[in-house]
Amino acid sequence: MKSNRGPAAADSNRRALLASARRLFAERGIGVPLSAIAKDAGVGQGVLYRHFPNRSALAMAVFEDNLAHLDQVAAEARQEHRGRAFKVVWQEVLEMVLTDVAFIEMAVAARRDTRARGADTRLGRLLEPLLTGAREAGAVAPSVKTMDLLRTLRACYGVVVTAMDPPTARADVAALMKGLGLPGPDRS
């Protein structure tokens, strides 16, 4: 365990807790013991609870970080890949679902948490203008709506958690996307 630097370490402790939570949630799911997260971050459980009073608060902080990452990917995609911005961001979202099942678990938790009612729509708000551009460019069928994408992500979650192994999950998600006429997880 790291030595206690008190309030001076608050920001670095918070960052370490978020990094550990993100990794352990991805590896073991959202139910990973909070004590394991604190230990992995090199802090005591008291430090964890000072920053995040419960599992839901920690999961929401990780979810918000993931959404901030997607916001950044979207901003870069709009500049660098104008006509392909939707594809770039959608593939990043699919990668999160394929490699971080906890991302969807956190989205579901956000939908149910009355304090975070708007959190589940943030991804939709991020995808909507990109989807509009993709529809206008003919890259996605005109009938595809934002809610269709959010439902598709829930279906992908089901594929991932029921697949025999990660390669099978990836292949099944790719097939699902192909059937729906959406970009698949292949980054090529």
Image (cartoon, grey):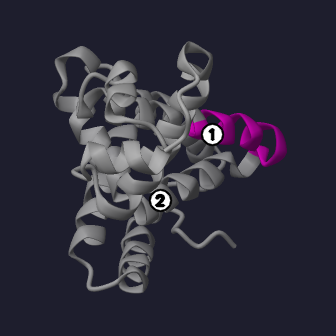
Separation (CA) of disc 1 from disc 2? 19 Å
The image shows residue 165 at horizontal and vertical percentages of: 33, 84
The image shows residue 155 at horizontal and vertical percentages of: 26, 60
Tell me where residue 129 sits by quadrant.
top right
Closer to us: 12 or 144: 12
Residue to which mark 2 is pinned: 94
The image shows residue 150 at horizontal and vertical percentages of: 34, 45
Callout 2 amino acid: Leu
Q: Earlier in the sequence, mark 1 or mark 2?
A: 2
Question: Residue, x 76% and y 39% (percent of image)?
Answer: 76
Closer to us: 4 or 28: 4
Q: Residues within 10 Å of mark 2 (few under 14, many from 20)?
A: many
Residue to which mark 1 is pinned: 133
Question: Which quadrant of the figure contains the C terminus?
Answer: bottom right
Left or right of 30 in this view: 183: right
- SS of the residue at dot 2? helix
Question: Residue, x 45% and y 37% (percent of image)?
Answer: 43
Q: Nearer the viewer, mark 1 or mark 2?
A: 2
- SS of the residue at dot 1? helix
Callout 1 amino acid: Gly
Q: Are marks 1 and 2 in contact (CB under 8 Å)?
A: no
Farthest front residue? 3
Q: Is residue 81 magenta?
A: yes
Left or right of 145 in this view: 71: right
The image shows residue 181 at horizontal and vertical percentages of: 46, 65
Magenta region: 69-82
Question: Residue, x 77% and y 43% (percent of image)?
Answer: 82
